[in-house]
Image (cartoon, grey):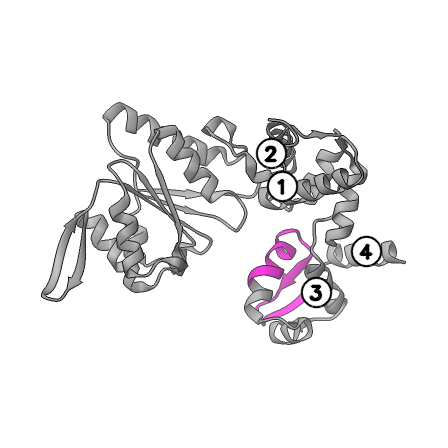
């Protein structure tokens, strides 16, 4: 694919299970399920696919559909009212995959509809004279979510395959970026790859976003190769530090400093809701060893967090 045509990281995506990087435990689960489908001529098992944001849940679902040579019907949970859910299920053919992303946002009514669908392969719809039962094709349901506990327990229990994606290592992220850039026809300097990976927070979406930003910096200068300088310039423009922290996460470290503060106070100081702080800002800080939360709910930087804060301050002087 020429560079003129390939201008976005989403222009190409993995097309087979062999093209997916990392999460070998999930690859083995999926491979066994695919082999079973071909050997016994059965549909793919109904699946719960869960992970933190950006780890490629929809990509895995897409690859499974391609491996099976079936259609993928994809939608977001928050977009499904009763009528939309019925239309989605009725549009599927035998063995097709129906992917509902952000499944935890489905209202309980729609989750109960899915329960009935899984138990009977029928839809129960209301009409002017009562209820009507409509047969549905023998398709497979894939529920993708960042919060499986918000999916009704009976619905989770009916999922025959449980796929849990983990964060990638830096070396795995290097390979993700290398393969995606090759598929796009972009030339990337070898030294730029680990720089992207170390700022990628173990998350393919983040690493590929940095790659895209570096490509824009390269193009703006009329150059042919994405260099280490382009990556660093892109991160400077996007305010991403050398550990991959966003400007909001960096501000959090600054506000906390050497103090111990509670969630509600940090939320007020940042000017965002407490849920944004606890679910968006804090997880990577905790995972990377920069932040600890005690039983009383107090937040405090670790020594590593304090050291990182000091280094960031020196860089801005």
Q: Quadrant of residue 102?
A: bottom left
Quick one: label 1, few (<14), some, or many (20+) residues within 10 Å?
Answer: many
Find residue 176 and name its label.
2
Percent position (x, y) of residue 97?
33, 40
Residues at circles 2 and 1 in contact by the CB criterion of under 8 Å = yes
Report if residue 68 lies within the magenta region: no
- Compute the Cα span from label 4 to label 2: 28 Å
Magenta-colored span: 279-299
Q: Earlier in the sequence, mark 2 or mark 1?
A: 2
Q: Which residue is mark 4?
A: 312
Secondary element at image label 2: helix
Q: Earlier in the sequence, mark 4 or mark 3?
A: 3
Q: Which residue is mark 3?
A: 252
Q: Tell me the residue at 24%/57% (across/down).
A: 113
Q: Which residue is mark 1?
A: 208
Q: Tell me the residue at 32%/59% (across/down).
A: 152
């Amino acid at each position: 694919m020429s560079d003129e045509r390939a201008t976005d990281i989403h222009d190409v995506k993995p097309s087979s299970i062999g093209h997916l990087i990392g999460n070998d435990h999930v690859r083995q689960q999926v491979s066994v399920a695919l082999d079973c489908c071909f050997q016994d001529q059965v549909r793919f098992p109904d699946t719960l696919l869960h992970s933190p944001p950006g780890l490629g849940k929809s990509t895995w679902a897409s690859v499974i559909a391609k491996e099976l040579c079936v259609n993928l019907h994809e939608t977001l949970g928050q977009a499904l009212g009763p009528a939309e859910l019925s239309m989605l299920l009725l549009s599927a053919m035998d063995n097709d995959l129906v992917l509902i992303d952000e499944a935890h946002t489905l209202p309980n009514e729609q989750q109960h509809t899915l329960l009935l669908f899984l138990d009977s392969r029928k839809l129960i719809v209301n009409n002017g004279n009562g209820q009507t039962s409509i047969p549905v094709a023998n398709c497979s349901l894939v529920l993708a979510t960042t919060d499986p506990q918000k999916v009704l327990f009976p619905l989770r229990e009916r999922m025959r395959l449980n796929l849990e994606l983990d964060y990638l290592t830096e070396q795995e992220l290097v390979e993700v970026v290398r393969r995606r850039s090759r598929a796009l026809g972009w030339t990337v300097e070898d030294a730029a790859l680990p720089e992207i990976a170390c700022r990628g927070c173990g998350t393919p979406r983040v690493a590929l976003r940095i790659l895209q930003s570096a490509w824009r910096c390269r193009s703006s200068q009329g150059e042919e190769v994405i260099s280490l300088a382009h990556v660093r310039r892109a991160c400077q423009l996007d305010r991403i530090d050398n550990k991959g922290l966003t400007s909001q996460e960096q501000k959090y470290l600054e506000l906390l400093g050497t103090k111990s503060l509670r969630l509600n106070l940090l939320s007020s100081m940042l000017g965002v809701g407490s849920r944004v702080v606890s679910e968006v800002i804090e997880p990577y800080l905790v995972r990377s060893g920069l932040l600890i939360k005690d039983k009383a709910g107090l937040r405090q930087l670790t020594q590593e967090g304090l050291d990182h804060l000091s280094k960031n301050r020196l860089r801005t002087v």
